[in-house]
Structures are given as structure tokens and as C-alpha cells.
């Protein structure tokens, strides 16, 4: 998946007994309260959502 996306993901608890899984990536240099930066933050988020959808949608459907 990381190869398909082209960047590293952060993986949550991967123990076999974990009920939920979390996979993410984060925009580290962002202040959500800085309205002057919102367009950049929103563009980053929209891009990541589209990339995640493209990589994960079929994998999740097959579960």
C-alpha cells in the first residue's frame, strides 16, 4: 500500500486481538486555526483522501 501511495503510512495497533485498525498520514506543518493556510490544508486533505480511496477501496470491499 505504501508503495502504491508513494509515502509512508502510520499504522495503529496491529495486534491480532485489536478490534479496530488505524492507518493514517499526517500534515505535520499545519495549524488548523490558521485560516490563511486552510486552502493548502484542504488541498492536501482532498489529495490524500482520493489517494487512499484509490488504494484501499477494493481491498476493503474484498474483506
Image (spheres, rainbow, N blue to C red):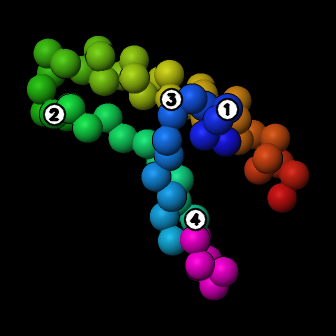
Residue underneath mark 3: 48
Q: Earlier in the sequence, mark 2 or mark 3?
A: 2
Residue in view at x 53 percent, y 53 percent: 23
Which mark is on residue 21?
4
Residue placed most toward the observer, 11 or 62: 11
Residue underneath mark 2: 31
Mark 2 and mark 4 in contact? Answer it, CB < 8 Å: no
Q: Is residue 30 visible?
A: yes
Q: Earlier in the sequence, mark 1 or mark 3?
A: 1
Residue in view at x 87 percent, y 52 percent: 62
Give SS at disc 4: loop
Count the labels in the image.
Answer: 4
Residue in view at x 50 percent, y 29 percent: 48
Q: Which residues are magenta?
A: 14-20
Q: Is residue 53 visible?
A: no
- Observer-side mark, 1 or 3, equals 1
- Quarter of the figure with the C terminus: bottom right
Residue underneath mark 1: 4
Give SS at disc 1: helix
Tell me where residue 32 sits by quadrant. top left
Give SS at disc 2: loop
Q: Earlier in the sequence, mark 1 or mark 4?
A: 1
Q: CA distance from mark 1 to mark 3?
A: 12 Å
Q: CA distance from mark 2 to mark 3?
A: 18 Å
Q: CA distance from mark 3 to mark 4?
A: 18 Å
Prevailing secondary structure of the magenta residues = loop
Residue 8, horizontal then vertical, whole percent: 49, 41
- Quarter of the figure with the N terminus: top right
Amino acid at each position: 500500500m505504501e508503495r502504491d501511495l508513494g509515502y509512508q503510512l502510520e499504522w495503529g495497533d496491529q495486534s491480532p486481538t485489536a478490534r479496530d485498525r488505524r492507518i493514517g498520514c499526517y500534515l505535520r506543518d499545519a495549524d488548523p486555526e490558521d485560516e490563511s493556510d486552510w486552502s493548502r490544508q484542504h488541498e492536501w486533505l482532498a489529495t490524500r483522501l482520493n489517494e487512499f480511496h484509490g488504494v484501499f477501496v477494493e481491498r476493503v470491499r474484498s474483506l
